[in-house]
Image (cartoon, rainbow, N blue to C red):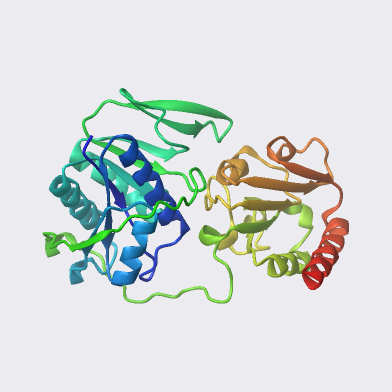
Amino acid sequence: MSKVIIFAENFDGKFKKATLEAMAYGAEIAEKTGGEAVAVSIGKVSNEELASLGDYGANKVLSITREALEMLDARVYARVIAQAVEKEGADVLVFTVSNASKAIAPRVAVRLRAGMVYGASGLPTCFNPFTVPKKVFHGKAFADVVINSEKKVISLAQNSFGVVMNKKEAVIEQMDAAVDPGLIRSKVTNVEKSTGKVLLNDAEIIVSGGRGMKGPDRWKPLEELADTLGAALACSRPVSDEGWRSHTEHVGQTGKIVAPNLYLAFGISGAIQHLAGVSSSKVIVAVNTDKDAPIFASADYGIIGDVHAVLPRLNEALKKFKAEN
């Protein structure tokens, strides 16, 4: 196997944890197969930021900065990434699981006639045949997916591999990709960004509430806890459907799929649709009055109790701990 391409998705010119994890994952595959790890970055990113990918195993970074690519268009990005794969003669292409990759990765796979695994949970367990593990049945079981095609596309589930340092001197190369302006049929005229709070997709810690919060006016202790922990706020679907919280905070199968290091669930029963969206969390802590609530089966730690009794005591204890440390 020759080379592994890693799509280094950037956010306002910066690489976030998920991208660095995918970089480290792709670099490990390259080392195990005697190949090289090549990152592909699209958009305006500083040379210093591009070079930082070498800390996570990149041997080379292809930087593509054409004006036509400043706005993300999945069809155009797919063509450009496919060009990079062909240019480098790569056999494996790695994405992180993100909103962008959901649109781009399948298109690349079709263009390359490549088999694809979405939501890989670890390194390939075998390279002949090429076998990739992933979670199935909403995280309740594992499957080994065999890719028989010459080229292979993998989307790595967040928090499945870790951000592993593997220092290399990455060579930065500008790539002049061919772009057909006629393919770009959409235009972004205005962007409004959330400020002053931790975003769910970036959060290491998420504090989430369900119907057990008992109303839209009883969320202050939860907001206080999130502020103390530097966490993002989330909610279950019934809460957003009732209008207690914004739909932008809804996590679950029909909302945002998250993978924080710590997920704190207050008053959430744990329907299978909710667990499907949070099952990749490293540690789940649940608080619920119902000892038979399904969420306890998936939780690493559980408290059987009223959230409105637990939250004030937890807030008090955490504030005291922070003050003493």
Q: Position of residue 201 (x, y in %)?
A: 51, 58
Quarter of the picture containing the N terminus is: top left
Residue 266 position (above or below residue 106): below
Q: Position of residue 112 (x, y in %)?
A: 19, 40
Choose top left, top right, bottom left or bottom right for residue 12.
bottom left
Classify residue 24 as left or right of residue 114.
right
Residue 9 in view: no
Quarter of the picture containing the C terminus is: bottom right
Classify residue 62 as left or right of residue 227.
left
46, 262: nearer the viewer: 46
Choose top left, top right, bottom left or bottom right for residue 148.
top left
Residue drawn 57% across and 41% down?
276
Choose top left, top right, bottom left or bottom right for residue 54.
bottom left
Classify residue 21 as left or right of residue 1.
right
Residue 189 position (above or below residue 78): below
228, 269: nearer the viewer: 228
Q: Position of residue 57 (x, y in %)?
A: 35, 51
Residue drawn 32% across and 64% down?
51
Residue 29 in view: yes
Classify residue 309 as left or right of residue 18.
right
Residue drawn 60% across and 64% down?
246
Count of residue discs: 0
112, 121: nearer the viewer: 121
Residue 35 position (above or below residue 140): below
